[in-house]
Image (cartoon, helix red, strand yellow):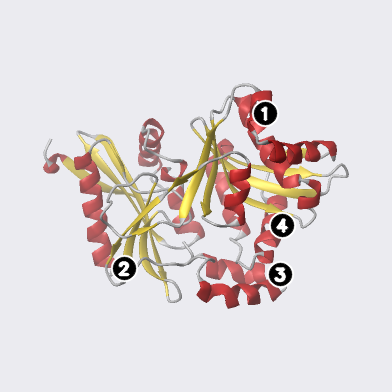
Amino acid sequence: MSPADVQIKRLQSGDSANAKRWDAFVFASPQATFFHRAGWLRMVEDVFRHQGFFLYAERAGEIAGVLPLGQVKSRLFGHSLVALPFTVYGGVVADDPQVALSLEQEAHRIALSLGVDHLEYRNTSPQHPDWPKQDLYVTFRKEIFAEEEANMLAIPRKQRAMVRKGLKNGLQSHIDADASRFFALYADNVHRHGTPAMPKRYFQALLDEFGPDAEVLTVTDDKGRALSSVLSFYFRDEVLPYYAGDDESARDLAANDFKYWELMRRACAKGFKVFDYGRSKQGTGSYAFKKNWGFEPTPLHYEYQLFKRDSVPQNNPSNAKYQLLIKAWRKLPLGVANWLGPFIVRNLA
């Protein structure tokens, strides 16, 4: 078919009929990820108050491709159009190259009309090798075996000993009905690391929007005290631990190790096949932690079209210019940091 046979349309908030069609396409496409789901439009627009451009291509009345985009405009961190803000995977999902090209051409047109500094695609595989790219991030994915003991034995010996330590300490895991315990641990954790926290309502919105496909698992000690928590997503046959937090005592009790084992064990019992440990920056503690679990890194391909910039943006804690801000943030009272954080983090897409 010719380009004229492809129509590019935009999904609007509240359009439940086309959102269902969108998600049906996403679930059926091998290229798609959890972050291509239509529910992210609510997060971009209702929670973070940015403008979403969720584009879909129709051919012969059927959806043949999607491209979720969000505009982020900040005096501090610049003006961008991203596929997709607040997620680690994104970019075009299409049935064929012609559909993909049509979606990208519309994204380019929107980017120019908005006057953004750059357009960013967070691809899991390279799409435009000649474009400027961000090579800081990797992802970690590994098969979940059908038998629980096989998954335990697949963990390298030293890391397996930490999991067994958590078991010996009498730790327990629970599926929470809301984000309250998770947020308390998460907010304290990111504050210790000197970074602002997402708003609590964002995490509750994730649970509300995605239902059984978003879940909070919290680890407690034998007295019921919450030690560590993770908010995970489920997509097809994959589980993705995405946001996490812990108490300062969690490390000594091996609560974090136990937490991820419990998530893997529960996913195994439900028949899930892939454990996606998520994105990490190379050379960080989380990168080393995931390697210690026996996961191997796979590069992510964040590709850019630069309009008003000379180089790829570096809005992340590894950037040396943010070190003083990180140190200052750690000194803020937690209550003040939790109040102020959402105003900052909404621009750190």
In the image, 258 versus 129, the foreground residue is 129
Where disc 3 sits, the SS reads: helix
Looking at the image, residue 279 sits to the left or right of residue 329; the answer is left
Image marks 3 and 1: residues in contact by CB distance under 8 Å: no
Query: Residue at horizontal 23%, vertical 37%?
Result: 96
What mark, if any, has residue 116 been given in the picture? 2
10 Å crowding of disc 1: few (<14), some (14-19), many (20+)? few
The residue where tag 3 is placed is 335
Disc nearer the start of the sequence (4/1): 1
Q: Position of residue 185 (x, y in %)?
A: 71, 55
**In the picture, which quadrant includes the N terminus?**
top left
Disc nearer the start of the sequence (2/1): 2
Disc nearer the start of the sequence (3/1): 1
Residue type at the position of mark 2: Val
Q: Position of residue 241 (x, y in %)?
A: 59, 43
Residue type at the position of mark 4: Ala
How far separated are the C-alphas under marks 4 and 3? 11 Å
Where disc 1 sits, the SS reads: helix
Disc nearer the start of the sequence (2/4): 2
* Foreground: disc 4 or disc 1: 1
The residue where tag 4 is placed is 184
Residue type at the position of mark 1: Leu
Where disc 2 sits, the SS reads: loop
* Foreground: disc 2 or disc 1: 1
Query: Residue at horizontal 71%, vertical 57%?
Result: 184
Q: Position of residue 65 (x, y in %)?
A: 29, 40
How far separated are the C-alphas under marks 2 and 3? 34 Å
The residue where tag 1 is placed is 153
Disc nearer the start of the sequence (2/3): 2
